[in-house]
Image (cartoon, grey):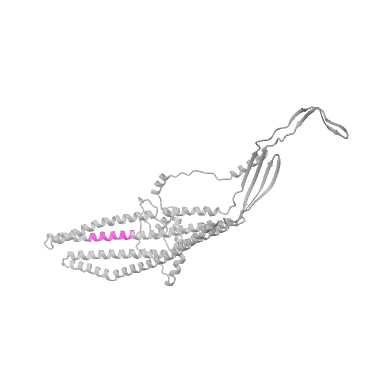
Amino acid sequence: MNYRFALVTAVLISGITGCQSYQRLPLQLDDYSRQWAERPLDVESIQSYAASLSDSGEPHAPFDSSDGLSLFEAEAVALHFNPRLRLTRAAAEVPLASAKEAGWWPDPQFEVTVLRFVDRGEKARFKLDGPSIDGINAGGLESTPLGIRRDGSDFIDDPWIVGAGLSITIPISGRLAVEKDLRWSQYSAAWRRILVSEWELVTELRAAWLKWSSSTERLRITRDYIEQLETIAEMTVQLVAAGEMKPTEGRLLKIELARRRTETLSFEHEEQQNRLTLLSLMGLAPSSPVSFQPQLSIDLVGLPVENLRDELVKYHPQIKSAEADYEAAEQQLRLEIRRQYPDLNIGPSYSLDEGFSRFGLGLGLPIPLWNRNRQAIAEAVAAREAARVRAEAVVENVLSAFAQVELRLKYASQRRNALLETVAPLVEKQVEDSRTLLNLGEVDVLLLRDALTGSLDTKVELLDAALAKGRAANELQQMLRPRWFTPSRVDKQENN
């Protein structure tokens, strides 16, 4: 009996020792906040990441932040450090881990039952019987002599009943293979969400970069305008003192100069706010000393008009993500259908009853008669239909957004061309003529001021048109030619 219990204990211990152990990993947010504020950029991981992005065929200089980050270098930093993107990537590790460990057979189940008789009966007793005559037969008189005799009893010597069984589930339904396909499809959907996040991040970063570059340029041309006004203001002081200009006219220039200086404060605040937005998108601390290189345009790769719709539906990240979600819903329904079919439970059993050993084999097979996984199948069918409708809605939204971006790009290009071809030449001609008259001694300071103001307003309008065109070109470029930055872990394993 002790030997049997020792054997069972050894089997249980061998199974338990193969299990993983828990180890607590505490958060250290104070240390992380300090490391984040001191995050370096010229490190090997960023440089190698930037080099991998340049494999797309676009020529780029090596990563170097000492001369200020270019837009391409900022993309590499953002794709490496952006907190929202890192969270999406970390979340994708969950279905990946599930997919890697999917398809295992269920663990065998070992059961032991131990019973003991509460009422064991009475033990055998001995008693003294006197002589007795039992009867007469053919041989003569039959009698029982005097003696000590055993009194019969139903006492149970071995009161223990021990039963042991091992149950193994054999997945003859094939659901484990389907479950593995489901987990990998869920990982593929999660990976597509990473690509969508990267696509959205790059689009947002480029738009923010254009906005920061525009605010920087607007601040520069405003300061140039103020310097020119200051020169004119010095002239007006002399003209008013000489009596060649009314004090009220000279005061108009002072008012304009004060108003523009106040406006410059607003532009400086906007430029600093746009800079903080860029740092946030790149996952850098607000106190980071890194500088940026302005860029006011986005190169647009031209495609034949007849291929635009096909290219859009074929490559747009949101559409590809919706397709991956639909495939995951399809695999989920496939798994629920497969779960209708039973798996075989089989295993040996052993029992010890009143000292008698028995050995047998048990079989179990559920009968799909009433339940048949109806609820889960109905939910999976509805989920697949919802995924289909969502994919169709994404296509509609993408095509509608594409038409709007095309219209915005067309209008911004027309507006910018009109300003360059008609308004800008006239304004520059007016400034040039005013300066010529001033050099000839024909003093009209207010006319020169109005000409300079018109030149500034025209430059600002050109800047706004360039910003609108750059944003539209950015969205259109990302729609038609998105770049996949993060390879799936499956692709990495296949390429190694």
The residues colored magenta run 212-228
Q: Answer left or right for 109 relative to 201.
A: right
Residue 347, x across and y down, in percent: 65, 49
Note whether 394 is above or below 167 in the view shown. Answer: below
The verdict on residue 227 being magenta is yes
Which residue is situated farthest in the left direction here? 243
Q: Which is more toward the observer, 72 or 454?
A: 454
Which residue is situated farthest in the front direction here? 136
Which residue is drawn at the image coordinates 49% and 53% (left, top)? 93
Residue 378, x across and y down, in percent: 52, 59
Rendering quarter of residue 417: bottom left
Q: Is residue 491 visible?
A: no
Quarter occupied by the C terminus: bottom right
Note whether 223 is above or below 137 in the view shown. Answer: below
Q: Answer left or right for 478 relative to 370.
A: left
Which residue is drawn at the image coordinates 18% and 60% (left, top)? 253
Quarter occupied by the N terminus: top right
Q: Is residue 213 visible?
A: yes
Q: Answer left or right for 17 relative to 64.
A: right
Residue 193, x across and y down, in percent: 46, 58
Q: Which is more toward the observer, 441 or 347?
A: 347
Rendering quarter of residue 443: bottom left
Note whether 89 is above or below 353 in the view shown. Answer: below
The verdict on residue 309 being magenta is no
Classified by dominant secondary structure, the portion drawn in magenta counts as helix
